[in-house]
Image (cartoon, rainbow, N blue to C red):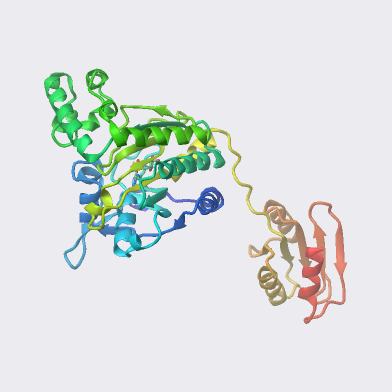
Amino acid sequence: MSEQQQAPRGTYDVLPGVAEHRARLVDGVAAPAFARAGYARIETPAFEHTELFARGVGESTEIVSKEMYTFTDQGERSLTLRPEGTAPVCRAYVEHGMHKLAQPVKLWYEGSFFRQEAPQAGRFRQFFQIGAEALGSDDPALDAEAIVLLARMLEAAGATGCRLRISSLGSSAERAAYSDQLKVYLRANEAALSADVRERIELNPLRAFDAKHEGTQAVMTDAPRLLSSISGEDRAHFDDVLALLTAAGVAYEIDDTLVRGLDYYTRTVFEFTSDRLGAQSGVGGGGRYDGLVELLGGPPTPGIGWAAGVERVLAVAEAAGAQPAAAAAADAYIALDAEADREAAFALACALRERGLAALIELGGRSLKGQLKQADRAGAKSLVILGGGRAAYDAAVKNMHTGEQRELNDLTKQDYIDRIAAELIA
Ligand code: HAM
């Protein structure tokens, strides 16, 4: 098969079977957990003005400088397929005057995001995130609540055994002062750094903590740490978040090398990782972004949030041995032979579905024996047999579990649906 005949690199089809797992994660686990914590659902467009991400996520980040799918539309506007959801949610918050609502405003979303990264296991160019954003309060309890929500959601999804690493980046002033200090340190050790890190000293020195390069890692072991320079209100905020996590029974590890790949973070940052995944160990992560709404033209508004990768959550759950959701069984399989009244059978299937029953009808032209096998494969609870020498509208209903078969005779056009439905429900 040629490349053009396949889905583009880094994308994939969600086939039946997997689609149900995903639906169970989003609708069965995430949606109820968010509702219980007072988060309302929001959906933003799949593309935005490029400027939103350039300003919001930051020109110096890998996401903006290397990974965005950007195009020009017919009106010569530069648009970008969203690489992440925080900047769009903040844009929507400002655009719809949500600062006038009771604060904090808690929102969650699920959808596809796009990054032009080198595809590998667990890393896609179109991937899905479940995300949460809480805007309008800097209460440390909001940070802790968001983190606990993600911790519990991962467990409920079967993605057990994830590690939570947490740190604080302080205020943007502290971060800027630290960044200058780190630049000086990196320049002093330039010779031992990878070319990549060396090139980014001015632009994004914090990313040196993420380097895989041995020499760089050795240099970073002794690098000054931002967390140790955080004091006053920022330190107290961080200590409060930690105390609340402990109170909720969520285990964490303080990691002063934790930096995130987006520029908007202030104060709390965190990441859930799993060693059940290969190189792409990040299951979900987030943090506080107290300057972002203002940066995007809104009033000064603190915010905290996270996003988790749907593919990665499901991969961890699978590796942890979580049982996939059983396929929904059909209530009835309508079997018919050449003699049967096809219109009556078709009307019966439609009417049963309208009554809330999962009804399948033979559409493959199989023999009666083949239909029985097919009903078994579909996990049907009952088989409704039409035709087979019976009078028009008469039917047999066979219980697929017990094998017991009941004949329903003297059915008429007016009552056959009611009587068959009653037999199925009984
Ligand atoms: P992020 O760390 O860039 O944060 O992405 C969050 C999660 O999305 C990752 O932990 C990972 O599970 C998943 N993910 C990211 N890139 C890919 C990819 N190429 N393929 C598969 N999965 C991927 C954000 O996006 C922030 N907006 C999170 C946030 C919300 N911070 C505050 N509020």
Task: State the residue lying farthest toward the bottom.
Answer: 414
Q: Is residue 345 shown to the viewer in this render?
A: yes
Quarter of the rendered structure image containing ligand 1: top left
Task: Name the residue furthest front.
Answer: 232
Q: Is 94 left, or right, of 325 in this rendering?
A: left
x and y percent of residue 290 in the render?
A: 29, 46
Q: Position of residue 399 (x, y in %)?
A: 81, 57
Work out whether residue 25 or residue 39 is closer to the camera in this orientation and state it: 39
Foreground residue, 84 or 164? 164
| Above-or-below relation of 70 to 10 | below
Q: Quadrant of the C terminus?
A: bottom right
Q: Is residue 222 left or right of residue 306?
A: left
Asked where in the image residue 93 lies, by quadrant, the reply is bottom left
- Judged left or right of residue 271, residue 178 is left
Q: Residue visible at 24% across and 51% down? A: 53
Q: Quadrant of residue 385?
A: bottom right
Residue at image position (77%, 59%) is: 382
- Counting the numbered discs, the total is 0
Inspect this view and state whether residue 10 appears: no
Q: Give the residue displayed 69% in from the left and 77% down from the top.
A: 343
What x and y, as percent, mark residue 198?
Answer: 15, 28
Along the line of sight, which residue is nearer the eye, 273 or 75? 273
Q: Is residue 55 above or below residue 101?
A: above
In the displayed structure, 57 sits above or below 267; it is below
Query: Looking at the image, which residue is at 35% across and 32% down?
Result: 167
